[in-house]
Amino acid sequence: MAVLLCLLALPLVALVVRLSPAAVWHRLGQPDALAALRLSLITSAAAALAVVVLGLPVAYLLATRDFPGKRLVQAIVELPIVLPPTVAGVGLLLAFGRVGLVGGALHAVGITLPFTTLAVVVAQSFVATPFFIAAGVAGLAAVESRYLDVAATLRAGPVYRFFNVMLPLALPSILAGAAMSWARALGEFGATITFAGSLAGRTETMPLAVYAALETNIDTAVALSILLVVVSFGVLACLRYAPWAGGVGGGNRKGSRAYGPGR
Amino acid sequence: MHLGGMLATSLFTACTSRPGLVVFAAASLTDAFNELGDSLRRRDPGLRIQFNFAGSQTLAFQIEQGAAADVFASADERWMAIVRDSGYVADTPSTLVRNRLVVIVPERNRAHVENLEDLARQGIRLVLAADQVPAGRYARQVLLNLSHKDGFGPDFAPRVLANVVSNESNVRSVATKVQLGEADAGIVYVSDVTPAIAARVRRIDIPDAENVIAPYPIALLRRAPHLEAGRAFIASALAPEGQRVLERNGFLPRD
């Protein structure tokens, strides 16, 4: 266990001990770091939102229905977890690029994705989706059907049952999934640099800025890295200990283990 | 030929210790060095060479972080000097080849970039290497040089730079983005327009007077695990046969 912990923890320690907190603060205050930080916050929030809005219906169907091709859908939504992000980037470029599979049609209606901030959001959504779906499916599937049945006997319609019974019961898992997908979007690198390119203020998110800064100013790279480590750690800590995360007596018993709060 | 045989022998003896010679080379050398490696291996089937191609700045960083490399071939003298100043270079670097820049546009050229002046036209999607990458620095230098030329105007460089949509981390990614038609134009080395890429892009030449002729230094690294093999590799790259391979791949001879 010691070996594994060293492997995982030492790189983080090495990052943190290199710079004093004051130095980190100073570096993060530089305009280029701030631009990357702002862009990362905006794009990852947008990606997480997109993943929740588009992913919730899919998670609902996967959790509650059987339909032809369900396994295929499951495989497709899980694939980005194991797909190398660079491959995702190449695929996105060949599909949604200017001369890509559907890029021509997009271009014709005035949407050109590559090298835009929107492309960053698309790349982040691509890699972040499975983290939300997995937690969402687990949470929704764990809602016991008798609650829904009781609601139905009280003449609650399907829409009412979903929003007022199912969703509140599954909320911890859904929030956990949203947080995980946000954190994954925040850390996205390979798909972004391939599909969206790298331009300060437009497509250069924090991980890309870390990569660029490595070659010019390693302390800036380290400062940005420390911030990413702290944020990622914060997300995980929240998922584990926040009251709504189901740590103690939470609503979902078997639900949110897939990627969400562990026990 | 005698020299070649001698090199092959020394390469072989030095390389019997596994896993073999490790050459860190600028991304622009990818095709040329792969070809050179193949021809060396044909002469000596026991030879083991591993290439690590990346932006020179990335390689310099990796070397400074203790990567076990034997030879470093950089696309500019600056990164070689940085590695040398940190004490990682064994011998005085030699000039391997020289390279110059060219503008490329996709074969379909939907943005109608026909000449250098068109690069400044508003709305052109230009991709450059980032300015810490040698090719990116040279590209910006070329734009400045052109700004002093009649017919371009002093605001040429800023107008072109306003069209940059991505700063790529190495020059080969620039060629890729143009080749895929995602960028309207890019500035790369002449040597980057490999046969595979040449079919998919058009070249717009930069006049020699405004172009940057960049020397590529190559050096043996201190603490190289394969000292003799490294020295032999450098010698074979500088020998007429090696130079011919490099020239075939679009480089200018070393002097």
Image (cartoon, rainbow, N blue to C red):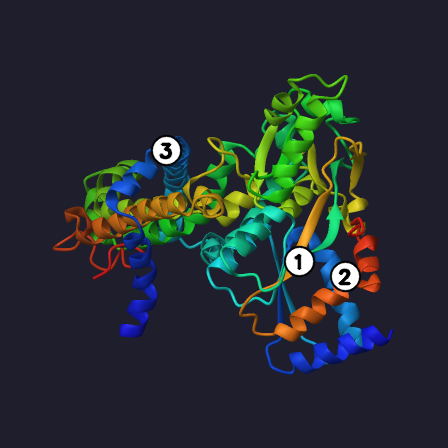
Circle 1 SS class: strand
Name the amino acid type tagged 1.
Ile
Name the amino acid type tagged 3.
Gln
Q: Mark 1 points at which residue?
A: B218
**Discs 3 and 2 lie in a common subunit:** no
Q: In this view, does B113 lie to the left or right of B62?
A: right
For the point 47% across and 64% down, the residue is: B66
CA neighbours of label 3 inside 10 A, class few (<14), some (14 to 19), many (20+): few
Q: Name the residue under label 2.
A: B238
Which x, y percent locates residue A204?
Answer: 47, 37
Disc ID at residue A30: 3
Q: Nearer the viewer, mark 3 or mark 1?
A: 1
CA neighbours of label 1 inside 10 A, class few (<14), some (14 to 19), many (20+): many
Marked residue chain, label 1: B
Name the amino acid type tagged 2.
Leu
Marked residue chain, label 3: A
Q: Is residue A105 above or below residue B50?
A: above
Work out how far the residue at label 3 is from the one at label 1, CA to CA, in angstroms.
36 Å
Relative depth, front residue between A46 and B100: B100
Contact, mark 3 vs mark 1 (Cβ under 8 Å): no
CA neighbours of label 2 inside 10 A, class few (<14), some (14 to 19), many (20+): many
Q: In this view, does A239 lie above or below B68?
A: above
Q: In this view, does A176 lie to the left or right of A127?
A: left
For the point 57% across and 51% down, the residue is: B81
For the point 37% across and 48% down, the residue is: A222
**Residue B147, located in which quarter of the rendered image?**
top right
Q: Which of marks 3 and 2 is in front?
A: 2
Q: Taking the image as drawn, is residue B63 in sight?
A: yes
Contact, mark 1 vs mark 2 (Cβ under 8 Å): yes
Which x, y percent locates residue A220?
Answer: 39, 43
Disc ID at residue A216: none
**Discs 3 and 1 lie in a common subunit:** no
